[in-house]
Image: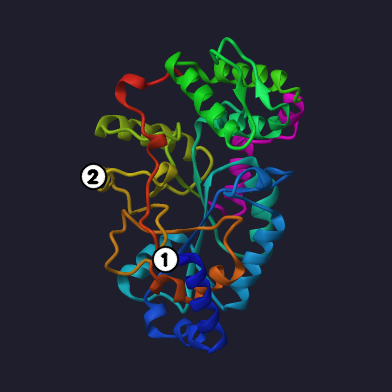
Amino acid sequence: MLKQAKMGVLRLAETTGASGLLSGSAWRRHRLLILCYHGVSMYDEHEWADLYISPETLRRRMELVARARCHVIPLSEAVDRLQKGTLPDRAVVLTFDDGLHDFFSVAFPIVELFGYPVTLYLTTYYVEFNRPVFDPMCSYLLWKGRHKQKLEWPEVFPAPVALGGDGHQRAAAAIGQFALSRKLSGREKDDLLARLAGRLDIDYQELCRKRVMHLITPEEARELAARGADLQYHTHRHRAYRSRERMFAELQDNRRRIVTFTSNEPRHFCYTGGFHLPEYSVYLKEYGMLSATTCKAGLCTARTDPLLLPRLVDFTGLSDLEFRAWLEGTADLLPRRPHEMSEGQLVEEEELAAT
């Protein structure tokens, strides 16, 4: 009901011209919209997960940004001008998380055509170990193999697991826990994925050849930086830790790789999975970070903590009407459900897996 009511209000605001007035107001001029993207399909990935969008959807979003006469500016400039109160009209920042190969092969060429600056928050472990990222590939394989109805794997499951409905999601969680409990290395987890694919009658090597669920290579990272992409912190292993020491170690590991790809020193951070603890702002400030982005929807103002910047996470289920309303600012005025963070990225000290 809340969704239907909001859509009705947004349609009314657009047809009456109220959204257009707000878009050109001083109120909107003092606010920054940071857009967040994850994956852009090379094949059927957007049918598997909402956080994947099709290339057509990304192209249409970029066209809507242009039609709304938004000013897309680099992240560093935006953070600085937000604090100084000198943002241009309808300021927007584009960010992509993780650094999947589809960013290099599909998304960046689209963004490049529009001439928009873009920040890539790059996690680096799977850049060096360039095999499919374990968690998403596990889920993707189970989704592709859901026609088998049941998965028998005595080594992992004590009894056959149904894959229909949301069964493949429960199976993915169980396999992830299996890998975590045995502290499997990256190579051992890759072998586990290959065995899973075999049980589902999926050609794993063909998916690897197509670079599905792979991150960019070091060479691709350097090319992206040379073509203008801004590479920033996203941790090395895409994990969050409670301790300051572990967090700093993750950032240092991440930085050591990023500075080999680009001449720019990274100073901005993206929380993995949007997860953050209250003490993280203190840690990041001590580390010297200039900004950190979350996955909580909202517009940024000069009063927003720069280490807790909200972003609009774009996804397949977001309508063009809602997207336009965020560009204009209307959507930020409407009530939203409380944001719930997933603790899936948090690794307790006793759970640290070997890498």
Q: Is residue 205 above or below residue 230?
A: above
Q: Position of residue 86 (x, y in %)?
A: 37, 76
Q: Secondary structure at mark 2?
A: helix
Q: Position of residue 176 (x, y in %)?
A: 50, 25
Residue 326 can be seen in this image: no
Looking at the rendering, which quadrant does residue 220 occupy?
top right
Instruction: Identify the residue at image location x=56%, y=53%.
Output: 229
Q: Position of residue 114 (x, y in %)?
A: 65, 66
Q: Quickly name the residue at label 2.
A: 286
Using the numbered discs, state the Cα–Cα distance from disc 1 to disc 2 in whole angstroms.
22 Å
Query: Which label belongs to residue 275?
Result: none
Residue 18 shown left or right of residue 336 in the figure: right
Element on which disc 1 rests = helix
Q: Amino acid at mark 2?
A: Glu
Nearer to me, 10 or 91: 10
Picture residue at 49% right of the left edge, 19% below the top: 179
Instruction: Give yes or no for residue 293 being in the magenta stretch.
Output: no
Q: What are the residue bounds of the magenta stretch?
A: 203-230
Q: Is residue 42 shown above or below 346?
A: below
The verdict on residue 210 being magenta is yes
Look at 35% across and 57% down and name the residue there: 338
Give the labeled residue for mark 1: 78
